[in-house]
Image (cartoon, rainbow, N blue to C red):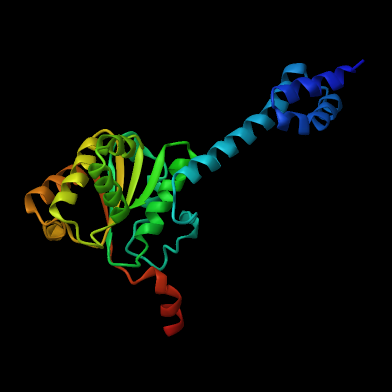
Amino acid sequence: MNTAHEQLINNLNYLKLNEMILHLDDTINFINKNNLSFTDGLIKLTNYEIDHKEETMTKAMVKVGAFPHLKELNDFDFSFQENINEDQIYDFTTHRFIHQNENIVFLGSSGVGKTHLATSIGISAAKKRISTYFIKCHDLITQLKKANIENRLEDRLRHFTKYKLLIIDELGYLPIDKEDSKLLFQLIDRRYEKRSTIITTNINFSSWGDIFKDPVLANAILDRVLHHAHVVQITGKSYRLKDYYSEDK
């Protein structure tokens, strides 16, 4: 005949509460030693399970985000890029801009840290279980173009619209023809005032007409992106070469 302790472990195992099983004996000892109530002891025991599930969910959300790396803001050297408002960047990790359906545009030449900052903000959102997805602009357009050819564009647009935060990296690094620009416009239009988008680009806004091969379409995209946007312009040296600059001093 099973003891009460064995029956409890069997019950927890049946419910797949593995963390509670793992910490059961230590928690019982803690309860007895500190003369805790049944309720206090149960809270302590269930907290182990909740903390584990929260950690697992957080890791899953970060994995789904498809980030290019797992660098966070603490890994960014703000002293190297002195023109960046560090307080503003950290304020983005409160995610108020997401709750208000605002956008962020990181504008600057290659290597200044745009992707690092965008990714770090995205990871912070994913850790708060805010649905987030990272994708290179070229890959995004390739997927939309392929879906359009296969008559499933609506599904792809719906897929990329569902994320509360979409990070579109490296807009303007490769030319975008007029038909592809129309596909991107459809996505931007769907997300307008309903979702938040972070865009990194090395192209000044005045030159977007050249990138999209259509000034009218470029203005329509800009209008929706910038209407509720925080523009962070980075004018420093290449962040990737900061070690080189340090050695050169």
Q: Is residue 243 above or below residue 106?
A: below
Extreme right residue here? 1
In the image, what residue occupies the spot 19% across and 57% down?
176
Nearest the viewer among 248 and 152 is 152
Extreme top residue here? 1
User: Residue 151 in the image: x percent, y percent?
Assistant: 24, 38
Q: Is residue 2 above or below residue 186?
A: above
User: Residue 145 in the image: x percent, y percent?
Assistant: 24, 48
User: Residue 131 in the image: x percent, y percent?
Assistant: 41, 37
Nearest the viewer among 5 and 103 is 5
Describe residue 214's horizontal placement relative to residue 151 as left or right.
left
Q: Is residue 124 above or below residue 116?
A: above
Extreme bottom residue here? 248
* Image quadrant containing the N terminus: top right
Describe residue 179's horizontal placement relative to residue 102 as left or right.
left
**Quarter-wise, where is residue 99 in the image?**
top left
Query: Is residue 249 visible to the viewer in this orientation of the structure?
Result: no
**Quarter-wise, where is residue 15 in the image?**
top right
Describe residue 177's horizontal placement relative to residue 109 as left or right.
left
In the image, what residue occupies the spot 49% across and 40% down?
61
* Image quadrant containing the C terminus: bottom left
